[in-house]
Amino acid sequence: IKTDFEVIVTFDWYSHAMVILPNTYSGAVCGLCGDANGNPQDDFVLPNGQPATDEIQFADSWKVADIPGCWAGCTEDCEVCTEAEKRAYRGDKHCGLLVKKQGPFSACLSAIDPAPYFEDCLFDTCLYKGHQEMVCHSISAYVTACQRQGIRTRERRTAAFCSPVCPPNQHYELCGPACPATCRGQAEVEECEEAALCTEGCFCNEGFLLSGDRCVPLAQCGCLHEGRYYKLGEKFFICPHCSERCTCKAAGVVECKPEGCAAGEVCTVQDGVRGCYPHECGRCEVLGAVSYSTFDGHLLHFAGTCTYMLAAAEAAGPKDPLVPFTVKVVKDSGKEGPFIRQLLVTVHGVTVGMARGIRWEVTVDGEQHLLPLTLAGGAVTVSQEGTHQVLQVQGGPKLLYNGNAYVLLTLPSTYRHHTKGLCGNFDGDANNDPTTPQELGAAWGTLTTTCTHGSPPPTCPSATPGPCGVLTEATGPLAGCHRVVAPQEYVAACMQEQCSQVGAGALCRSLQAYTTACQAAGGQLQEWRAAAKCPLSCPPNSHYELCTRTCDHTCASLSASIQCTNKCFEGCQCDEGFLFNGDECVPTDSCGC
C-alpha cells in the first residue's frame, strides 16, 4: 500500500510487515515501531511516554483491542533460547547463509547489515526448534530488503531447502518482474512503480496473465469497471444501496441490471465486498441424544437410532445463488440409549465425516484428513475450535459439532422456505413440521434391521428442573450466557434427556450443549465443570482452558495461513513450546510438512 504522502506499508501475508515513512514523520509517530527520530534508545516506551519495564508491558500498552482467546504471551518461566542453544542454527543449513561472506547474499552484505536479520532468524528458529519454515521466512525478509535496493542475490532454494510451492499456472522466480503482466494492464495503463529492480515470488507462466490472485489465459481475463477490476463471472454491486447488480462477462463486457436486496437481507460490506447479506440466520440444534430444536424454534423429542437427514437444501436452478448441501446424522444405540455416531456433510461435491469422540480429524469422501482443512478451492473450511469441530461454507451453512451430543447448524435467511429434514422447512411456522416418531422416521430416516425410529419419549415425572436448574441460575457460572442465549429451551431439553437416558453423563452433555451455544454466540462463560462434576481430560503436554483458540496453534500454521473462526471455545491448549499435530501436542521440531 502506498499513499500520496509517501507512506508505504508492505506485508508478506505471513509474518513480515514493513512501514516506510518519509523523514517528515520523524518524531511525529508512536507505537510498536517507535518514534522514528533516529534514536533507537527511546523506542521502548508506553503511550504516556514512560519507559516500559518489559516486553509484555510494552506490547500490551499498544494493544488496539481485546480479542477472546488471545493473550499477551508467556509471563512466568518463559522459554528463552540461550546463546549455546542458538549456536546450533548458525550454520549454512539454517541462518548462517545470511552472513556467509561467499554465500548467496554476498553482494548485499555491505549495503544492508545482515546482523539484525541474522539475530531475528536465530531467535525464531531456536524458539521453533529449527523448523525450516522459520528459516525460510527470515531469509526472505532479507532478500526483499536487498531487492528493494536494486541488489541481486543468488539462488539459495533447493528441493530440500525452502522449496517454493506455487499455485496452478505459476512458477517460482528469484528475480521476477516487480510489475508483472496483469489482466487489468491489458485494459489500461497500471500505476505500478517498480520500487525494486526485481522481486522474488511466484509468477504467471508464459501465455497467462494475473487476474486477482490467479493466472489465467487472456480469454479468461475479467472486466474493468469504474476503475476497479473484477474477475470473469464475478457479480458485484456498484452503488451504496445495492440497487444495481453487475456481472463481468466475456471480452471484458460488464452487464448491469436493477436489483435490490431480498427480504431479510441488508446492503452492507463484509470482508471488503459490498453486497446483500442476511441480517439474521436460522438455527437448528441437536440438544442431546433425543432432543432437537428446528429452524422455526419447535422442540422435538425423537429417539430414533437410524441415519436421518438433519437438513438439506437444493438450488432451484443454475442461476439460484443458494449453495446446495445435505447434513445427515448417523445415530446408534448403546447402554445409555441413542447417541450420535457420525455427522456427514455433503457440499461442493465432497462429503465430510465428523465422528463421535474424534478430535482433529475428519474424513473426506471416506479418506482420513487432519485438521485444519480447506476444500473446494477455499469454499469449505473445517477446523478444530477447542473441543468442537467447525465446518464453514462460503455463503452457505455453518456447522459446529462438539464431538458428543450437540450440533449447531446455522443458515443465512436466504435459505428460508428451502430446507427439509429434521430441522424443518425454515418457513417461520413451528407447527407445520412432522413431530411423531413415525412421521419423522418415514420422512427423513433410513430404516434397517439394526435400527428403529423409536417411540415417543417418556413424560418426565417432575416439573421441577432439578440439576438442570443450574442453566437458569442468575448468579451461577452460566449467568454470563443468558444475554446471548436464552436458557429455557435448553432446560426443557436437559430435563427430557435426564428422564430418557440412564447414567450421569446426560447432565454433562446437556450443560455442555448450552455452554457451546453460549460461546458460539459470544457469551461470557465462567468455570462450570468442577461444580457440575463434568471434567475434561487433555492429552499430554496440554492443559484445559475456558477460552482458547486451538485452531491458531497448530503445526500447519507454521507454513500456511489458516482460516479459523473469530471465537474462542473451551478446550485443551498445548503447553508453551508445543503445537497441535493432529490430536497430539508436539514440540515444534516434531511438526511435519
Image (tube, grey):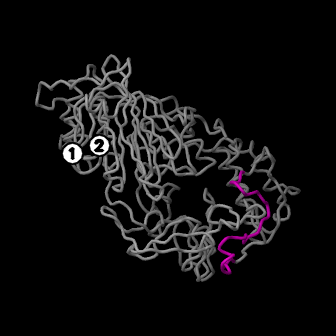
Q: Quadrant of the N terminus?
A: bottom right
Q: Earlier in the sequence, mark 1 or mark 2?
A: 2
Between 13 and 497, the one nearer to me in the picture: 497
Q: Which residue is mark 2?
A: 424
Q: Residue at x 20, y 24 (%)?
A: 499
In percent of width and height, residue 318 lies at: 48, 56
- In the rendered view, does 24 fall on the left or right side of 388? right
Amino acid residing under circle 1: Ala
Circle 2: residue type: Gly
Q: Please report the residue visible at 70 percent of the width from the left and 78 percent of the height from the top.
A: 193
Vertical position of residue 202 compared to residue 457: above or below: below
Residue found 34% across the figure and 50% down from its top: 418
Quadrant assignment, res 454 = top left
Asked whether, in this view, residue 212 is left or right of residue 495, the answer is: right
Residue placed under numbered mark 1 in the picture: 430
Q: Position of residue 419 (x, y in %)?
A: 34, 46
Q: Which residues lie in the magenta part? A: 165-192
Say whether residue 113 is left or right of residue 310. right
Residue drawn at 22 percent across, 26 percent down? 498
Q: Nearer the viewer, residue 199 or 315?
A: 315
Of helix, strand and loop, which one carries label 2? loop
Residue 401 figure quarter: top left
